[in-house]
Amino acid sequence: MARMDGPLTVLGLESSCDDTAAAVVRGRDVLSSVVWGQTELHSAFGGVVPEIAARAHAEKIDICVAEALAQAGLTLAQVDAIAVTAGPGLIGGVLSGVMCAKGLAAGSGKPLVGVNHLAGHALTPRLTDGLAYPYLMLLVSGGHCQFLIVRGPQDFTRLGGTIDDAPGEAFDKTARLLGLPQPGGPSVEAEARAGDPARFAFPRPLLDRPGCDMSFSGLKTALLRQRDALVAAQGGLHGQDRADLCAGFQAAVCDVLAEKTARALAVYLDEAPNAPAFAIAGGVAANGAIRAALTDLCAARRVDFVAPPLRLCTDNAAMIAYAGAELYAAGQRDGMDMTARPRWPLDSGAAPLLGSGKKGAKA
C-alpha cells in the first residue's frame, strides 16, 4: 500500500525512442535521474534505427533502474508505485520498458501506472515550477509539435500541431542535408550563430492560413533546393553558406512558432485563466533562439513563460515518474494486460493531425 502521510515516491521508466532512462521522484523532488543515450549507436545511419534502439533498451533498462534506485538511496520496496512510458513511440523500445515495469511490479507487488510519453512532457512544468492548471503548452520535440491547453493529468485540449514533419525532425533532416552531425538540433543551432538569417528567402509555411496548425516539410525542401543551387553554381558549399542556410532555416522556424503561439495564446486567454502561463517542453525547447522569441512574445502579453531545465526538456524518466504520481493520485492503476502503444494522442477527441490507421490516430 502507498503511504498516505506524505508525497508519493515513484519509480519511472522511459524508453520511447533512443534514450533509456529511469528516475525516482518524490513529490516534486527528483531524487535521481539516469539517462543512457544511444547517439553513438545510430550515428552512422543518419537517424534512429528502431531495431538497434529496441535491443539497446532491452540491454540497459534494468541497469538504469538499479542505478536510479541506488542514486536515490532506496530499494524497490521503498517506492509507492512504478510508472512507465506505455506509448507513443518506437514500439520495440516502448515494449522493452513496459515489460521491465511489469516484471518489477509483479515481483514487488507495487502498483503499475502506464503513462503517455507526451503527457510526461506536458506535465513537466508542474514538476519543475509547480504550474497551476490550466496552462498553455507547446510540446515541441523530434517527433511531435502541438499546442495544448493542459487542464489536468488526463485533460488536454489540442489547439493545433504539425501536419507533416515536426520541428525536431526538420532540424535533423536539415543537418543531414548539410553534412552536420546528429542530433541535428544542436548542430544547426551552433552553425546558425555565425550565419546571416536574411541571406536566403525561406518560406514561412501556413502563416497565410488561420488556426494553429504548422508545416515544416516545405521549409526543409526549400533549404534542399537552395543547397543544390549553391552546389551547382560554385561546385560545393562554403562554410559561410552552411552557416547562412542554418540561420535562415532557424529564423523561419522561430517565426512560424512565434506566430502560431500568438494565435494559441489568444484562444487560451479567451478562457480568462486566473494565472495565465505558457510553457514549452520537448527537445526543441532547448533551442536558444526559439526560447528567446517565445519569451519576448509572452512578456508582451503579460503571460508567465515557463521553460523547464534543459535536462528535463529532452526525454527522461523523471517526467514519467511525476506524471505517474499525478495519475496514481487520480486513481489510475494498470494491470498486467497493459499494452505498449505506438500511437496515443493526448486529445482523443481532436481530429487526427497525420491521419489514422489500424492502430489509431498517429497524433
Image (tube, helix red, strand yellow):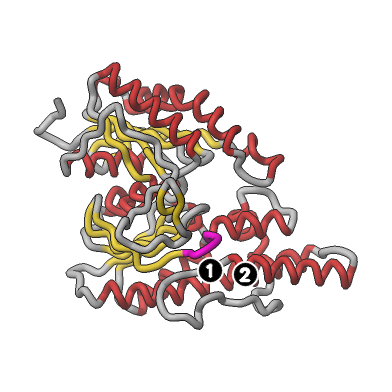
Q: Is residue 88 left or right of residue 133?
A: right
Residue 34: x and y in percent read 43, 33
Residue 144: x and y in percent read 47, 56
Residue 133: x and y in percent read 21, 59
| Badge 2 density bin: few <14, some 14–19, many ≥20, Cα 10 Å | some
Q: Which residue is mark 2?
A: 219
Task: Give the residue drawn at x 23%, y 24%.
Answer: 110
Q: Quadrant of residue 236?
A: bottom right
Magenta stretch: dominant secondary structure: loop
- Mark 1 touches mark 2? (CB < 8 Å): yes
| Badge 1 density bin: few <14, some 14–19, many ≥20, Cα 10 Å | many
Identify whether 63 is placed above or below 278.
Answer: above
Residue 340 appears in the rendering? yes
Q: Quadrant of residue 24?
A: top left
Please count the marks in the image.
Answer: 2
Task: Give the residue drawn at x 82%, y 64%.
Answer: 237
Amino acid at circle 1: Ser
Residue 163 drawn in magenta: yes
The C terminus lies in quadrant: bottom left
Residue 310 drawn in magenta: no
Q: Which residue is mark 1?
A: 215
Q: Nearer the viewer, residue 347 or 224?
A: 347
Task: Give the residue drawn at x 73%, y 58%.
Answer: 178
Which secondary structure, mark 2?
Answer: helix
Identify the magenta region.
162-166
Residue 115's disc number: none
Q: Is residue 144 left or right of residue 101?
A: right
Identify whether 277 is placed above or below 79.
Answer: below
Amino acid at circle 2: Leu
Which residue in the rendered view is the most extreme toward the right?
Answer: 235
Residue 299: x and y in percent read 36, 75
